[in-house]
Image (tube, rainbow, N blue to C red):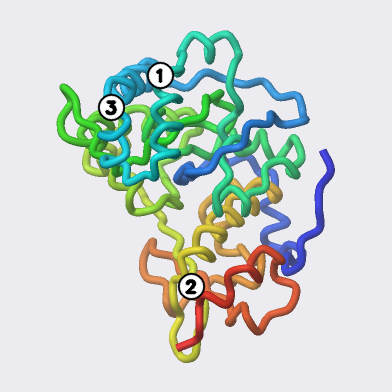
Amino acid sequence: MQTRTVPGRPSLSPALAARKGEGNRKMLMLVSPAKRLKDTPPQTAIETTVPHYLEEARELAEAGAALPVARLKALMKLSDSLAERAHARFVHFSADEIRRGGGIPALFAFDGDVYRGIDARTLERDGLEHLVRHLGILSGLYGLLFPFDRILAYRLEMGSRLTGPWGGDLYDFWRPRLASEIARRMAAIETRTLVNLASIEYWRAVDVAALAELVPGLRIVTPEFREWRGERAKIISFFAKRARGLMVRFVAENAIDTPDGLRDFSYEGYRYDSVMSEGDRWVFTRPDSRRLDGISPLCDTVMAKHPAG
């Protein structure tokens, strides 16, 4: 695959360069999925995997398929066309198809702001393989995915009130399940540190108390991305989502294994702010992007929506 040069990404600090490739395997990152999905597979040959919670995904898809389209539209707050598409995807969901090799690797399938920040199709193989060990994707349908897990297109957000024997919503379904698999993956890479890059909606699906029992000494680092607007450093949703993806890319490109390495994150003008940070809530700030040149052409399309003040 071809890599790209992105403005605003300076070279590594000497300390980070020294840490690169140490292979300490001391953190697992979690991100949210995206509503939009791509239907084209990656160009590079990779060894794909089957989602751990595939049978659970089948159960949820069957529950979704059993609902009238009008009910699905109301539950998920969708337009007529999107509700019909979501219902059709539930109806045609096939766990056997995924087992036979169907679907697209999750990291390449999602197409939201976070994933445009990651831009997985331009990462080198080493970076992709690094993410296989250090990245998990929370999902309303599949529960917990890893980068090369094959998935079929779907629309089911974690906050959806899809009811069943499990209870009144997807939190009732996933909270009793996710902690054990997250703990298992953390044990596999010998870490007790989780980096929370997920949205509030998806992070709520993680039973932190249960996870803490399974992972003694559990540490949760939560990066927060802010932009200076006047005299205030604000969280601006679009930029914060993109920054989460950029941090994942930073980890992939620089073989970051430890959470301390995240403090060197500097893509697109961000810097770790030791004054605003508190404990394991790590704040990264940057100047007003409307006054910065060469940050990202994608950002230009939304800057007008975020006036200063």
Q: Circle 2 is placed at which residue position?
A: 226
Q: Earlier in the sequence, mark 1 or mark 2?
A: 1
Please tell me whether mark 1 or mark 3 is closer to you in this view: 3
Measure how far apart labels 1 and 3 are at the Cα level: 11 Å
Crowd around label 1: few <14 · some 14–19 · many ≥20 (10 Å): some
Image-based side of 12 in relation to 159, left or right: right
The location of residue 269, given as percent across then percent down, is 65, 72
The location of residue 267, given as percent across then percent down, is 66, 64
- The number of numbered badges drawn on the structure is 3
Crowd around label 3: few <14 · some 14–19 · many ≥20 (10 Å): few
Mark 1 secondary-structure assignment: helix
The residue under label 2 is which amino acid type?
Arg
The residue under label 3 is which amino acid type?
Pro
Residue in front for this viewpoint, 158 or 264: 158
Q: Tell me if residue 303 comes above or below residue 111 in the rendering.
A: below
* Residue 68 disc label: 3
